[in-house]
Amino acid sequence: MTTCPFCGSSLVFKAGFRTTRTGERVQRFLCRVCLRRFSLNSQIKSDIALKNAEMSDPAENLAECFRVNSFTSKPAFEDSPLPFSKDVAPHNTPMTGEHLYTFASHDNSSREGEELPAGEVEMSSSEGAVTSSILLQKPGTGQDKELEGKLIGFAWWLKKQGKADATIKNYVAMLRLLVKNNANLEDPESVKDVLAKANKSDGWKVLAVKAYSSFLSLMGKTWIPPKVKATRPLPFIPMEKELDDLIAGCGPRTSTLLQLLKETGMRIGEALRLAWKDIDLERRVIILNEPEKNSNPRIFRISPKLVGMLNTLPKTNERIFPTAYNVIKANFEAQRKRLARKLNNPRLQNITFHTFRHWKATMEYHKTKDILHVKELLGHKDIENTMLYIQVEKALFNEDSSEFTVKVAKTPEEIQSLLEAGFEYVCEKDDLMFFRKRK
């Protein structure tokens, strides 16, 4: 029986193949407990387990997620301001920067069919501390040790400032891209020249300015950044039937995740963090205590349909959706493409995980006309982020009085009959309650 060399779990499943230099196809696996992807190699399994057991220094966790085709007793970068993890096996060939290269932890794409060195070890994590996967270069990029040391130090400094892992990864990647375009990180004017010549969106330039400003803060320097402002695009809001078609056509786990996103408006990262202890299936309540982007914690009431879907999922893991994000995303995109072709509806291809959040916010404002309620539902701390859905709702529905049937009720019996007929409460005036229903 196949077991994970990192945590020893037998809950693994096949995750494609990799091709060695000799043309041999090697089966890859994904652990459902620690969420690491690996290829079996009996000669190094015990060494990897030993390495993970000895990794206790927080800075050493930077090297938790990487691929390497040789081990050494020498540090990967002797000039690095941060230590790397202790090596687990002696080797005659010293490790260099060329032995380590990017293997993204959150949104890494599949590398099926890519030729890799024989005997290579793969380590990855869907969530975790800053890893060398977002710091170290691919072979042949020409980056020198001095730059690598600065980027590693920058990433760890951001981590100490409380930045999210995704933010750290984006900042480091942005600095690499600036250097690739001949920017000198020691010279702010050089960076301004690159930004001025770059044929990129305003959003890209805003991220570049933020990343470089943070880098200068670490170096104790300042600059006068160029004036760039990103325009927030209006989101795509599908029809509810399109969302339901997508949910119905996906597999059990994916459809449950999509139904959860539809009913709660969570971000995908928040949904993947949910544990079984966060759900009260009897009272149909979900508590989100680990929000993303510094949002407020929230509590949601869910439908009996979602409760039934959750009850069908196996409870073999602490988390409800223990699969790595990149695997879930790849499965969702494949099923979405199949359904778009089967239903002859190319609009389904525009639906992403975040589309469900936009749809939920728009529908909630349309139903309540209470922007503070929508703000609380989404967990926003700044209402400016929520105001977008007022504009979207007005454009989509373009309401006027001719689109509704309006009724007035005074007695409890009249109120009850209107509610049972599908009318919704609007307001109360002069002891009269006004209700409406779309024609």
Image (cartoon, grey):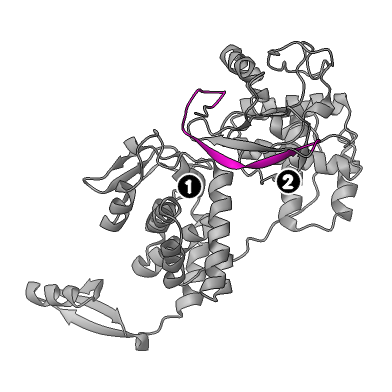
- What residue do we see at 29% from left, 51% from top? 307
Q: Is residue 83 above or below residue 439?
A: above
* Residue 73, percent from left and from top: 77, 10
Q: Which disc is residue 113 wearing?
A: 2
Q: Is residue 192 visible?
A: yes
Q: Is residue 297 above or below residue 87?
A: below
- Earlier sequence position, callout 2 versus callout 1: 2
Image quadrant containing the C terminus: bottom left
User: How far apart are labels 2 and 1 at the CA level?
Assistant: 45 Å
- What residue do we see at 62% from left, 39% from top? 166
Say which residue label 1 marks.
Answer: 381
Is residue 9 highlighted in magenta? yes
Report crowding for label 2: few under 14, some 14 to 19, many 20 or more residues within 10 A (C-alpha): few
Q: Is residue 235 visible?
A: no
* Residue 199, percent from left and from top: 84, 58
Indicate the secondary structure of the residue bearing disc 1. Answer: loop
In front here: 394 or 310? 310
> Which of the 4 image quarters holds residue 336?
bottom right
